[in-house]
Image (cartoon, rainbow, N blue to C red):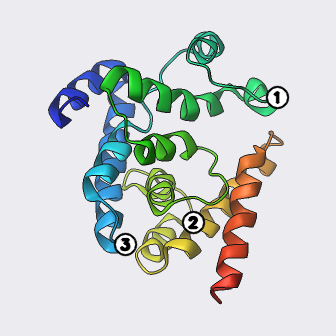
């Protein structure tokens, strides 16, 4: 794996200034949440920094690049191409930055849709993307506070916000988000947290 500074320099050249700033804010939030929940801070730092490395790839190139890197695309991702940047980003993180850590790559892959049985690192990266300090939407302050009190409750709320938002747009909802929400609710019920 490249050094942090090498990754940072290479990432900056791949992203717009706005997207790069967002990535730094996600990194910052991921580190704070990792400290709070006892997750490997360096893994959270790298996953938070790199999570959107495929975000600025033009839509007309996403499908070709996904094919090149062996990303299997379902019909929802084919229709909502912005969803491709998660799994493609995990492959680019390995190829461009030499990141071999499967936990980091998995967190990058799931940061847009979520998925079944998410690890703590997966949850932290998904949530950090949702609540980093540059985000400004109704309820974000509540969600930021909740994230530092109860990671699972905040994650559940973020899934529900996403689902409601996608429905309001009459857009397509990726099945992984439903699986993620259901998996989390079953886990929380089992633990007596819901």
Place residue 50 in its image quadrant. top left
- Between the residue at mark 3 and the residue at mark 2, the CA separation in whole angstroms equals 14 Å
At horizontal 57% and vertical 58% (from top left) the residue drawn is 118
Residue 101 vertical placement versus 16 (above, below): below
183 sits to left or right of 102: right
Residue 31 on image: x %, y %: 29, 58
Residue 177 vertical placement versus 188 (above, below): above
Which of label 3 and label 2 is nearer to you? 3
Which residue reaches farthest bottom?
192
Packing grade of label 1 (10 A; few <14, some 14-19, many >=20) is: few
> Does residue 141 appear in the picture of this structure?
yes
At horizontal 34% and vertical 53% (from top left) the residue drawn is 44
**N-terminal of the two: label 3 or label 1?**
3
Q: State the SS at label 2.
A: helix
- Residue 37, labelled with which disc? 3
- Between the residue at mark 3 and the residue at mark 1, the CA separation in whole angstroms equals 36 Å
**N-terminal of the two: label 2 or label 1?**
1
What residue would you read off at disc 2?
155
Residue 182 on image: x %, y %: 75, 65
Where the N terminus falls, by quadrant? Answer: top left
């Amino acid at each position: 794996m490249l050094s942090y500074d090498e990754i940072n320099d290479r990432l900056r050249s791949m992203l717009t200034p706005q997207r790069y700033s967002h990535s730094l804010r996600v990194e910052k939030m991921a580190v704070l949440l990792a400290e709070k929940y006892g997750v490997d801070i360096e893994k959270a730092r790298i996953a938070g920094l790199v999570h959107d490395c495929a975000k600025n790839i033009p839509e007309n190139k996403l499908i070709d690049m996904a094919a090149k890197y062996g990303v299997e695309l379902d019909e929802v991702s084919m229709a909502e191409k912005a969803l491709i940047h998660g799994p493609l980003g995990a492959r680019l993180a390995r190829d461009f930055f030499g990141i071999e850590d499967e936990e980091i790559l998995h967190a990058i892959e799931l940061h847009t849709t979520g998925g079944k049985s998410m690890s703590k690192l997966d949850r932290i990266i998904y949530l950090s993307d949702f609540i980093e300090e540059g985000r400004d939407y109704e309820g974000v302050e509540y969600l930021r506070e909740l994230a530092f009190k109860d990671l699972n409750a905040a994650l559940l709320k973020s899934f529900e916000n996403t689902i409601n938002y996608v429905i309001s747009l009459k857009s397509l909802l990726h099945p992984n988000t439903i699986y993620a929400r259901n998996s989390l609710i079953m886990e929380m019920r089992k633990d007596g947290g819901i």
